[in-house]
């Protein structure tokens, strides 16, 4: 499913996309595109797309804007509590378009 | 042919057994589970009420089942075991043969024989399904009572509180947690819990539950008194699930429990029992850590390791019960002959040590109110470390130095991780508690050993020469102060340049907002410009304060707390139009809550049209300058505090700093504006103004220090300019002025020399920096709504105009609040 153009996401930030009724947080990090669930499992708020992205020990992560836990953009796993994770979605860039598979 | 293993029960221990057995040989494993879902974290069950979903509590990894060839049969309880023919019969399968059978049936909640116990809205607290029915019942209830004041009862009480019920705890013993605590500790726990709003009823033995007169249920106690409540939760202990074993002819303890040997084998050598259903040397274990140990022993024994043995387990516990720290270790009741006790207690903390007659060995301990010593004390008991000459120091404040522990010391008893394993993990690259958890599982279950594990990691890093300096984070090997100078001296204008020249990696949620704040302090560019926006912390990112349900609150600036009727009405109109919850803040402003992200630009368009501007309540920046009404109206006022407050607020508005800044101006020494609790406080005198600095309210209140007396208005402003800019240059990230002052060598005297005597010769520079800020100020919200590229970011979905369906409100006292 087509989401938006790459240039609609500021580099090193995220947006939220509605994909078949689900909220997906889509991030653009140094030109790469990642997608994980938008719901922060700790607060229950749909806000992960609004977190700060960065890397911890080289792993790309987003920090929840609510309580600041880090979620891996590769695996969806919470770095502070490995028993918690969010879904990960596969993405593709077709020309300038971002798609979620 | 593969060994056929049948496991009955897929709880936490059953699941651990599967993880342990997988990879130890070739097995065909079938698991029967009577619950409709696979293993979940029952220890964290209460967190279901604070928003964790069943999926987040799940422990059963799909990959394990696939890779180890495990068949999981959910909602399919085993009905009988035929030990002679080595087959089990389940609800859906007539016969499933086994070579080895493992009973991990757990336990069931004990419900005392109370008349009326099966009435509607009487529950037990054990499974996710129990929680779901309790949640549903709570929606039509006002009060709830838990029968049982033990560990599980208090967990259940926490859950009822989280559901918003008026909560009662009914206990038949004379104290709470009778098994783990003594009388004094129980009394303190009761007081702490009651302070949180739950009511504790002791020595109340429930005789019957009948129809209530005011509430739905009436609990009548043995002493003739009664309590009315809408719902009842029984949490009076657990009993081993041994009925299958019993009918299969296995040996059962007198008071229940399937008897096992040290290999976790029952009376039948092909049948094992593990976890809460098992009875070892006359004891059952109602905690997860011993169950995990049994799971490992059984798995290794089945895989052919004949030497592995279960050797009993420590039943020490540390918990946060309704917000109160409680820990009990070993022989807490001093039942060892000639044991000596040391007790420290005050009105919030109770600590007790039980030591051997020769005062060399720690036998047990109780901690209530402050359990920070738990990890260290447990080490003394588990590892038999000799006590210091004065054991009482252990509960007075001394913490155990982790470097004194032997490598064999067991640090995480839930996951069986020793100090040696933690050190090895650090050698292999772990740099933080988070990476340690991921690698070793240490501190990932109950978390009680977290602080101790962290100190071991830090100690090891130090040994390796990894400096734990005041570096901002892994991306910048500089303190905030150093980074500030680099940015200013090299005229760095964006994060990319800063990290490219002076850092490494991509940055993170620590260094990005810190650098963004420094850039804003130095150059005062719009913080949502494309190159700055992705750096901003939660609230700055959308120029509003994020609330727990993902909506925002809006606080327009009301300088000095002075507002016209026209503007008050405008605020009310906006709140009414957008359905916002309104509340007066502590800083003489009005906060509008519940705005969805896409509403923010519309709300601000109307506020700006009514003459408002951003209040920076979202920023680490000047918040407000509070004032009393001053000499204009007040009979006692000696100066016009309102005019001064407005002048200061308009001068410093939008100033980004290491942390938020609060100010106040009082018109006389009665100090109605509470200026001495602010970062900058001004109090009028007959001759001018007294200037106070570095006060703080909040978590750690601190009275401000007097910096200078009887200043005229222009000197006052000159000094405040210098003071603020000096703080902004030199403070650490997120360091308030109060802690900054305490960290400065020379304290307030030093600040006075710099600010009032210009001892560093930077006075003019600091003033010029402030002047540039004042001249470049612009309302961020005005810029945001007038810049289409920025405004377009204020929407929930990039590909839809739908609002966030997760946001819902209910009405309370005539206003919307999060559902």
Image: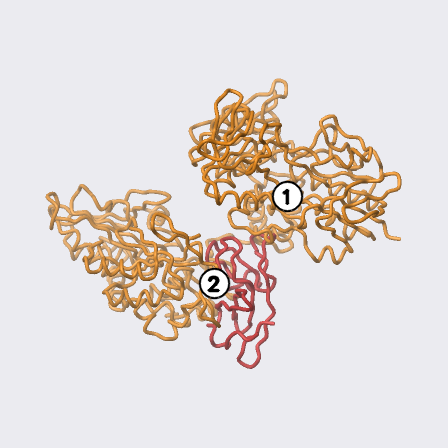
B632 and B554: which is toward the camera: B554
| Mark 2 → mark 1, Cα distance in angstroms | 34 Å
Q: Is residue B818 above or below residue B106?
A: below
Chain in orange, by letter, is B
The percent coordinates of residue B402 (x first, y second) are: 57, 41
The percent coordinates of residue B653 (x first, y second) are: 27, 61
Chain A representation colour: red
- Label 1 crowding class (10 Å Cα cut-off): few <14, some 14-19, many 20+? many
Image disc number at residue B635? none
Q: Which residue in the rendered view is the most extreme toward the top? A: B338
The percent coordinates of residue B348 (x first, y second) are: 44, 31
Tag 2's secondary structure?
strand
Answer left or right for B707 relative to B146: left
The percent coordinates of residue B32 (x first, y second) are: 75, 47
B399 and B252: which is toward the camera: B252
Q: Is residue B65 above or below residue B698?
A: below
Chain letter of the residue beneath label 1 in the structure image: B
Residue B64 in view (yes/no): yes
Give a yes or no on whether discs 2 and 1 share a subunit.
no
Chain letter of the residue beneath label 2 in the structure image: A
Q: For the point 86% across and 45% down, which residue is it?
A: B99
**Mark 2 or 1: the one toward you:** 2
Residue B753 in view (yes/no): no
A18 and B621: which is toward the camera: A18
Image disc number at residue A52? 2
Q: Which residue is mark 1?
A: B419
Answer left or right for B503 relative to B12: left
* Rendered image quadrant of residue A84: bottom right
- Label 2 crowding class (10 Å Cα cut-off): few <14, some 14-19, many 20+? many
Q: For the point 41% across and 63% down, which residue is it?
A: B536
Q: How many marks?
A: 2
């Amino acid at each position: 499913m087509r989401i938006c153009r790459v240039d609609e996401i500021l580099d090193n930030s995220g947006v939220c996309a509605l994909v078949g009724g689900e909220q997906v947080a889509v991030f653009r990090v140094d030109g790469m595109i990642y997608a994980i669930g938008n719901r922060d499992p700790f607060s229950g708020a749909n806000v992960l797309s609004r977190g700060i992205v960065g890397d911890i020990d080289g792993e790309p992560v987003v920090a929840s804007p609510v309580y600041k836990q880090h979620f891996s953009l590769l695996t969806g796993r919470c770095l502070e509590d490995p028993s918690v994770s969010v879904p990960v979605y596969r993405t593709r860039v077709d020309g300038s378009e971002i798609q979620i598979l | 042919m593969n060994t056929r293993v049948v496991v009955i029960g897929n709880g936490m221990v059953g699941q651990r057994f599967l993880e342990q057995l997988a990879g130890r040989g070739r097995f065909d494993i079938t698991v029967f589970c009577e619950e409709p879902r696979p293993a979940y974290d029952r220890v964290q069950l209460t967190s279901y009420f604070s928003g964790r979903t069943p999926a987040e509590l799940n422990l059963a990894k799909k990959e394990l089942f696939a890779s180890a060839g495990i068949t999981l049969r959910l909602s399919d309880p085993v009905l009988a075991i035929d030990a002679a023919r080595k087959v089990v019969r389940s609800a859906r399968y007539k016969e499933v043969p086994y070579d080895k059978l493992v009973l991990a049936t757990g336990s069931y909640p004990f419900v005392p024989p109370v008349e009326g116990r099966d009435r509607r809205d009487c529950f037990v607290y054990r499974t996710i399904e129990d929680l779901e029915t309790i949640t549903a019942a709570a929606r039509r209830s006002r009060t709830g009572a838990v029968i049982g004041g033990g560990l599980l009862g208090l967990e259940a009480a926490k859950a009822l509180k989280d559901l918003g019920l008026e909560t009662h705890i009914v206990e038949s013993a004379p104290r709470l947690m009778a098994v783990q605590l003594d009388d004094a500790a129980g009394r303190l726990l009761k007081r702490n819990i009651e302070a949180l709003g739950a009511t504790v009823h002791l020595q109340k033995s429930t005789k019957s539950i009948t129809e209530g007169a005011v509430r739905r249920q009436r609990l009548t106690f043995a002493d003739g008194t009664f309590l009315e409540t809408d719902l009842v939760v029984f949490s009076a202990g657990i009993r081993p699930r041994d009925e299958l074993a019993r009918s299969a002819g296995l040996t059962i303890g007198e008071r229940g429990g399937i008897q096992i040997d040290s290999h976790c084998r029952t009376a039948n050598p092909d049948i094992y029992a593990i976890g809460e259903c098992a009875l070892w040397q006359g004891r059952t274990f109602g905690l997860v850590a011993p169950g995990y140990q049994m799971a490992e022993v059984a798995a290794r024994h089945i895989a052919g390791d004949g030497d592995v043995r279960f050797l009993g387990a420590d039943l020490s516990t540390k918990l946060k019960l309704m917000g109160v720290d409680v820990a009990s270790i070993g022989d807490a009741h001093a039942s060892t002959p000639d044991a000596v006790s040391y007790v420290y207690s005050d009105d919030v903390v109770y600590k007790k040590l039980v030591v051997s007659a020769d005062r060399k060995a720690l036998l047990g301990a109780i901690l209530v109110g402050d359990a920070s010593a738990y990890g260290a004390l447990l080490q003394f008991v588990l590892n038999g470390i000799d006590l210091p000459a004065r054991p009482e120091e252990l509960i007075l404040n001394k913490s155990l130095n982790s470097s004194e522990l032997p490598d064999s010391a067991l640090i995480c008893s839930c996951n069986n991780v020793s100090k040696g394993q933690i050190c090895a993990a650090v050698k292999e690259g772990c740099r933080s508690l988070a990476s340690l958890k991921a690698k070793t599982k240490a501190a990932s279950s109950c978390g009680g050993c977290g602080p101790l594990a962290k100190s071991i990691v830090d100690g090891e890093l130090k040994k390796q020469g990894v400096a734990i300096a005041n570096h901002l984070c892994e991306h910048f090997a500089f303190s905030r102060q150093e980074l500030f100078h680099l940015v200013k001296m090299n005229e760095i204008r964006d994060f990319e340049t800063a990290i490219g020249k002076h850092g490494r990696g991509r940055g993170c949620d620590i260094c990005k907002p810190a650098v963004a704040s420094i850039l804003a302090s130095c150059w005062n560019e719009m913080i949502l410009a494309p190159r700055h926006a992705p750096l901003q912390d939660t609230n700055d990112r959308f120029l509003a304060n994020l609330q727990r349900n993902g909506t925002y609150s809006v606080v327009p600036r009301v300088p000095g707390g002075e507002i016209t009727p026209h503007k008050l009405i405008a605020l009310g109109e906006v709140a009414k139009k957008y359905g916002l919850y309104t509340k007066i803040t502590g800083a003489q402003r009005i906060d509008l809550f519940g705005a969805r992200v896409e509403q923010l630009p519309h709300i601000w368009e109307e506020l700006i049209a009514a003459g408002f501007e951003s209040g920076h309540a979202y920023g680490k920046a000047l918040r407000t300058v509070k004032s009393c009404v001053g000499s204009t109206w007040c009979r006692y006022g000696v100066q016009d505090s309102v005019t001064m407050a407005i002048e200061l607020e308009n001068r410093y508005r939008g100033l980004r700093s290491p942390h938020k800044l609060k100010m106040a101006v009082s018109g006389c020494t009665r100090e109605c504006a509470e200026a001495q609790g602010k970062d900058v406080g001004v109090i009028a005198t007959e001759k001018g103004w007294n200037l106070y600095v570095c006060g703080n309210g909040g978590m750690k209140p601190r009275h401000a220090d007097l910096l200078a007396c009887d200043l005229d208005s222009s000197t006052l402003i000159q000094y405040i300019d210098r003071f603020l800019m000096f703080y902004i240059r030199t403070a650490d990230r997120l360091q308030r002025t109060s802690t900054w002052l305490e960290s400065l060598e020379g304290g307030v005297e030093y600040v006075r020399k710099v600010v009032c005597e210009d001892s560093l010769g930077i006075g003019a520079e600091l003033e010029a920096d402030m002047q540039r800020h004042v001249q470049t100020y612009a309302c961020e919200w005005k810029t945001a709504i007038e810049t289409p590229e920025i405004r377009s970011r204020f929407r929930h979905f990039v590909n839809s105009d739908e609002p966030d369906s997760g946001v819902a409100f209910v009405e309370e006292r005539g206003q919307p609040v999060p559902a």
